[in-house]
């Protein structure tokens, strides 16, 4: 048995993610089917849209991998601004402040893999 989903599966328009600007189109894949300890989303941000700066801490802290597939933007990771573009991959460990924005002129698309990190 296998499951198949597509880009048109489960699209939600979410306003002000982590108090960011604008609305992000979020596609969630296999959330109700996968038994992995991770989740897989694809986010699309129009120019000027952002995910606000935030930190995953405590018992439910998440580690996140951002794979940028289209467009350009800027991330904030701790105190560091990092320019990102299609083909860039960023790992943000749990407990590290971060956020990002589309500062380009076309949509910014990012595949996002996230979950609770394993204990050392």
Image (cartoon, helix red, strand yellow):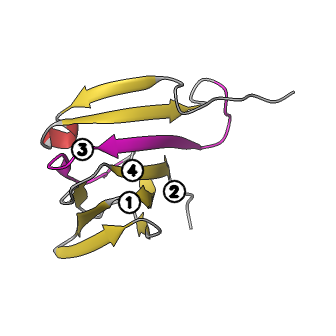
Local crowd size for mark 3, using a 10 Å CA cut-off: few (<14), some (14–19), many (≥20):
many
The foreground one among 85 and 28 is 85
Q: Position of residue 108 (x, y in %)?
A: 32, 52
Sequence order check, earlier mark of 4 and 1: 1
Q: Position of residue 58 (x, y in %)?
A: 33, 49
Q: Residue at x 15, y 37 (%)?
A: 22
Residue located beneath label 2 in the image: 117
Q: Position of residue 74 (x, y in %)?
A: 23, 65
Marks 2 & 1, CB-CB < 8 Å contact? yes
29 is within the stretch colored magenta: no
State the mark number for residue 86. Answer: none
Label 2 and label 3: CA atoms lie apart by: 30 Å
40 is within the stretch colored magenta: yes
Q: What is the number of callouts on the image?
A: 4
Q: Secondary structure at mark 4?
A: strand
Label 4 and label 2: CA atoms lie apart by: 24 Å
Residue located beneath label 3 in the image: 46
Residue located beneath label 4 in the image: 109
Q: Residue at x 53, y 42 (%)?
A: 40
């Amino acid at each position: 048995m296998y499951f198949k989903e597509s880009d048109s599966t489960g699209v939600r328009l979410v306003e002000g993610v982590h108090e960011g600007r604008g609305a992000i189109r979020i596609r969630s894949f296999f959330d109700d089917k996968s038994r992995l300890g991770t989740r897989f989303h694809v986010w699309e941000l129009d120019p000027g849209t952002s995910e606000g700066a935030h930190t995953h801490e405590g018992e439910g802290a998440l580690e996140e991998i951002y794979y940028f597939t289209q467009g350009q933007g800027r991330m904030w990771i701790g105190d560091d601004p990092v320019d990102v573009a299609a083909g860039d991959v960023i790992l943000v460990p749990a407990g590290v402040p971060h956020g990002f924005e589309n500062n380009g002129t076309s949509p910014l698309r990012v595949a996002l893999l996230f979950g609770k990190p394993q204990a050392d």
